[in-house]
Image (cartoon, rainbow, N blue to C red):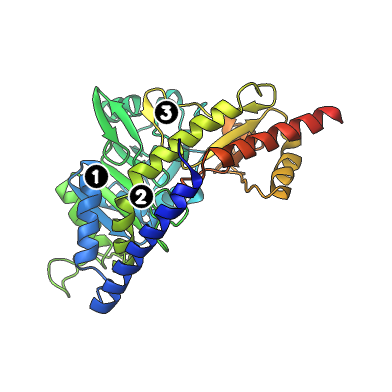
Amino acid sequence: MIKFLDLQSQYQGIKDQINEIVLEILEKGAFVGGEYVERFEREFAQELGIKYALGVGNGTDAIELALKALDLPLGSEVILPVNTFFGSLEGIVNAGLKPVFVDCGEDYCIDVKKIESKITHRTSAIMPVHLYGRVCEMEPILKLSRQYGLKVIEDCAQSYGAEIEVFGEKKYAGNIGDVGCFSFYPGKNLGAYGDGGAITTSCDEVFERARSLANHGRGKSKYEHLRIGRNSRLDGIQAGILSVKLGHIKRWNEIRRENARLYHRYLEGLDEFLVLPVLDQWERSVWHLYVVRLKQRNKRKAFMEFLHTHGVECGIHYPVPLSQEEEFRAKQWSEDIVSLPMGEHLGEEEISRVADLIKQFIRQDLMR
């Protein structure tokens, strides 16, 4: 069984590794590009089993640059889920493309059954978002992309290390579609000490265009510019930190999986009050978030205040769907959902305490 105190002792060793590599980078002055960025990109690609990884400034930039690197027709449509962070939409719009929204399913990811009805002659791509650490159901999406000649962009901001079987082959998020887009925001499973992101692909042309776009449209020489690009580069210090963390992320993700199982065990039998997230069936989530739904939405404010009063952080991901134009299921659920504490820093003692507080709230509510 995972023990919280055991993790604390491990973190000190990791902190020492990070301090050492940061000092090394500072002494070498390897701040932009160079060996530490190249090493991280190489290691990141190897871990995912993909040809290329390109470090960029952040996850939103990764989406915009990846879409531009795919050379999609300006103004064409990109299908995405309505239930996701604003950055998913932002990257599409900033790339000169038009977002088209699809509702979410029971797993909160894009409802694959509703994608085809949104495809038109203007559609150029589908962008599934692997939300909360769970991989979308990718086989139907890939079949549609082949049928209609569409590109597939994976938004992997919350899902580094998540696994799925696709057409009988084990795949990682970011190595399924044409490109993958990652965020290394500090709160992510694989987080930097600031902003950072990455683009993954196995296509030589897409990689070269993305690399150029992220570095002022530069060609092979310093002052050769092939296109209008931007400045979106992963810096050396963040790359060094991420390389250290990359060596520990598999264990951390396993701890998150164990914590999800513990939540399910301790919250079992509360069906009249809570809807628990779907546990792994055909994929292995990395549980960036553990999101429950309250069956009585009018109790959510009191529920969250109760947890906060007892020192338990919780949040809402996301309180407002990206589109209010249709009666999306995501719109209804946005009033019901609560994200409970989740992370590799938690153990059974912490999970048990959160569950006990939830049960205490329910008992008090029933007595009113």
Which residue sits at x=59%, y=33%? Answer: 292
Q: CA distance from mark 2 to mark 1?
A: 14 Å
Of mark 3 and mark 2, the one earlier in the sequence is: 3
Which residue sits at x=56%, y=36%? Answer: 291
Disc 1 marks a residue whose amino acid type is Glu
Q: Secondary structure at mark 1?
A: helix
Q: Quadrant of the N terminus?
A: top left
Measured from the top left, where is residue 168 in percent x and y?
24, 22
Answer few, some or many: residues within 10 Å of disc 3's Cα (few below 14, many 20 plus, some between 14 and 19). Answer: many
Q: Which residue is mark 1?
A: 47
Disc 2 marks a residue whose amino acid type is Phe
Q: CA distance from mark 1 to mark 3?
A: 30 Å
Q: Quadrant of the C terminus?
A: top right
Disc 3 marks a residue whose amino acid type is Ile
Q: Which residue is mark 3?
A: 115
- Could you tell me if the residues under marks 3 and 2 are in contact, i.e. CB atoms within 8 Å? no
Q: In the depicted view, which residue is nearer to us: 171 or 243?
A: 243
- Could you tell me if the residues under marks 2 and 1 are in contact, i.e. CB atoms within 8 Å? no
Q: In the depicted view, which residue is nearer to us: 104 or 363?
A: 363
Q: Secondary structure at mark 3?
A: loop
Q: Which mark is residue 67?
A: none
Count of labels in the image: 3
Answer few, some or many: residues within 10 Å of disc 1's Cα (few below 14, many 20 plus, some between 14 and 19). Answer: few
Depicted 312 relative to depicted 359: above or below: below
Of mark 1 and mark 3, the one earlier in the sequence is: 1
Q: Which mark is residue 182?
A: 2
Measured from the top left, where is residue 199 in percent x and y?
29, 51
Answer few, some or many: residues within 10 Å of disc 2's Cα (few below 14, many 20 plus, some between 14 and 19). Answer: many
Depicted 208 relative to depicted 170: above or below: below
Measured from the top left, where is residue 183 in percent x and y?
39, 52
